Amino acid sequence: MKYYILAALLLPGIIALLQGCSRKSPDDASSETKSQSETKTESETQMVLLPGGTFTMGDDNEIDATPHEVTVSAFYIDTNLVTQEQYEKLMGDNPSRWKANTNPVEQMRWSDGVRYCNARSEAEGLQACYDLDTWKCNFAANGFRLPTEAEWEYACRAGTKTMYSFGDDASKLKAYAWFEDNSASKPRPVGSKPANPWGLYDMHGNLWEWCNDFYKVDYYQESPGENPRGPEAGETKVLRGGAWKFSAESCSSAYRYNENPGYADVCFGYDIYGFRCVKNAPATTSPE
């Protein structure tokens, strides 16, 4: 299962490296969706407030995703993947291969996502979460950051326990996600498929999404039960959600992938990698 993705990446990876070296049937929203609190940040980016909760993270069918109970605190999460228009407005360039304002920004290294989070925090007068010398995240800061793997899966599942947020039937995925069977071999505009029950778009498919965590194959066996943040160190970072050129299986809520984070001194970036931001909710936040 995991080998499919590795093999599929080899040729596109070589092409991306050559191209990128110039840069150092859906229903209406459910009542659950409507219970989430939406807000716009100063950058006019829509976010959803997810009250904290406990869920079963993982999937018995994946060797690196042993099911276990996890509790996460309340947090805000971008409704959509960061778009090319949003990224270019803040960062001054658009490294994407598939240019379109409403498409998700791609060819993103993990470090690109981190730099965007800090820039967005500073633009909104918030405390930056990342030290760009050590790449460490200050989880106490009130600025933007990449989601932890646990936060990402909690948001993707949206209260469900099935393979996808709409159920277990992979044959229905075309109605909810952009993946190898329906994407026409390219990323698609954000929000053009239905949202999950909590009002979040493209959690399945379109682009792989960087998480903050380092990857470790057996991390779930040692993970703390409350707000896990991944191993202290590692060679690769976690990506979640699947992408436009990958299988239905890889788009499931629990499927884990990992890749070299591509620090600033590495010429790196595939057109299948993007991200969305999160930020902590105030300590007084409670479900509405």
Image (cartoon, grey):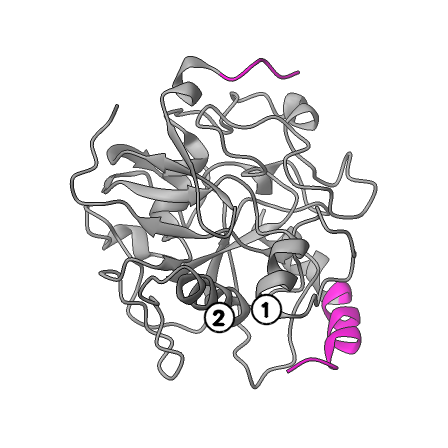
Which of 168/123 is in front?
Answer: 123
Specify the quadrant of the image occupied by residue 124. Answer: bottom left
Is 265 positioned to the left or the right of 152 in the image? Answer: right
Q: Secondary structure at mark 2?
A: helix
Q: In what quadrant of the picture does the C terminus appear? A: top left
* Residue 153 placement (x, y as % from top left): 41, 41
Gap between marks 2 and 1 measured at Cα: 9 Å
Q: Is residue 16 visible?
A: yes
Which of 190/256 is in front?
Answer: 190
Label number found at residue 91: 1
Q: Residue at x 46, y 37 (%)?
A: 61
Query: Which amino acid lies under the numbered mark 2 shown in the image of this protein?
Result: Arg
Question: How many other residues sit within 10 Å of disc 1, few (<14), some (14-19) or many (≥20)?
Answer: few
Q: Residue at x 67, y 56 (%)?
A: 84
Residue 283 vertical placement versus 93 (above, below)? above
Q: Secondary structure at mark 1?
A: helix
* Residue 227 placement (x, y as % from top left): 23, 49
Is 167 positioned to the left or the right of 84 in the image? Answer: left
Q: Are marks 2 and 1 in contact (CB under 8 Å)?
A: yes
Q: Which residues are magenta?
A: 11-29
* Residue 110 placement (x, y as % from top left): 51, 67
Which of 194/225 is in front?
Answer: 194
Label number found at residue 115: 2
Residue 16 covered by magenta stretch: yes
Query: Which amino acid lies under the numbered mark 1 shown in the image of this protein?
Result: Met
Residue 40 covered by magenta stretch: no
Question: How many other residues sit within 10 Å of disc 2, few (<14), some (14-19) or many (≥20)?
Answer: many
- Which comes before the other along the chain, label 2 or label 1? 1
Specify the quadrant of the image occupied by residue 97. Answer: bottom right
Is 170 positioned to the left or the right of 117 in the image? Answer: right
